[in-house]
Image (spheres, helix red, strand yellow):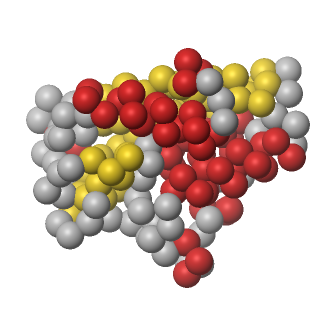
């Protein structure tokens, strides 16, 4: 059986925070605001994985009201979701994702992001696609107010 899930996340860009995308720190003058490290890519992937398995969403498993998750490394959350999927006999078939950001340019970081995700999820890097898009100056991402991410996953049981 193959199951599909979709995930989305968005966080506001602010001064004084690190920019973490796909568990990789990216040099930039702004970072993402959130209860955790605000890694929009991993958050979108987590929601897609949980959705495909009908196991809820990121807010149910890692609520921002829980101080345990304050400034947490989202890679650790992704690992917990991978373990939950394993416990429920799911295997990741593939992940396709998009990061939407006007700046910084993400193309130089894509391979490293894919590698980090593959390490966390213990899957082949060829099962992970990460793309970066700008909004041509339009909308909240185009005006550099925030960054969003989308993910679609396939799970096999």
Q: Nearer the viewer, residue 125 or 154?
A: 125
Image coordinates of residue 78 in percent, x first then y, are 61, 50
Where 24 falls versus 31 (above or below)? Answer: above
Q: Quadrant of residue 68?
A: bottom right
Q: Residue at x 59, y 57 (%)?
A: 76
Q: Residue at x 53, y 38 (%)?
A: 117
Residue 138, visible in the rendered structure: no
Image coordinates of residue 8 in percent, x first then y, are 48, 42
Where 98 falls versus 80 (above or below)? Answer: above
Q: Quadrant of residue 100?
A: top left
Where 36 falls versus 157 (above or below)? Answer: below
- Quadrant in which the N terminus appears: top right
Whether residue 62 sits left or right of residue 14 in the image: it is right
Q: Nearer the viewer, residue 134 or 69?
A: 69
Q: Residue at x 25, y 39 (%)?
A: 101
Whether residue 50 sits left or right of residue 139 in the image: it is right
Image coordinates of residue 144 in percent, x first then y, are 16, 48
Count how many numbered circles sit on residues in the image. 0
Image coordinates of residue 111 in percent, x first then y, are 39, 27
């Amino acid at each position: 059986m193959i199951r599909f899930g979709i995930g989305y996340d968005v966080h506001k860009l602010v001064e004084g925070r690190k920019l973490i995308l796909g568990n990789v720190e990216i040099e930039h003058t702004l970072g993402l605001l959130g209860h955790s490290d605000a890694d929009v890519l991993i958050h979108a992937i987590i929601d897609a994985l949980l959705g495909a398995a009908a196991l809820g969403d990121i807010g149910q498993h890692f609520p921002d009201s829980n101080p345990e998750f304050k400034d947490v490394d989202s890679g650790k959350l992704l690992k917990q979701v991978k373990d939950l999927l394993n416990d429920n006999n799911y295997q990741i078939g593939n992940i396709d994702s998009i990061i939407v950001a006007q700046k910084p340019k993400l193309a130089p970081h894509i391979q490293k992001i894919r590698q980090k995700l593959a390490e966390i999820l213990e899957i082949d890097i060829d099962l992970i696609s990460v793309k970066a898009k700008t909004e041509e100056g339009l909308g909240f991402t185009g005006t550099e107010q925030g960054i969003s991410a989308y993910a679609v996953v396939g799970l096999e049981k």
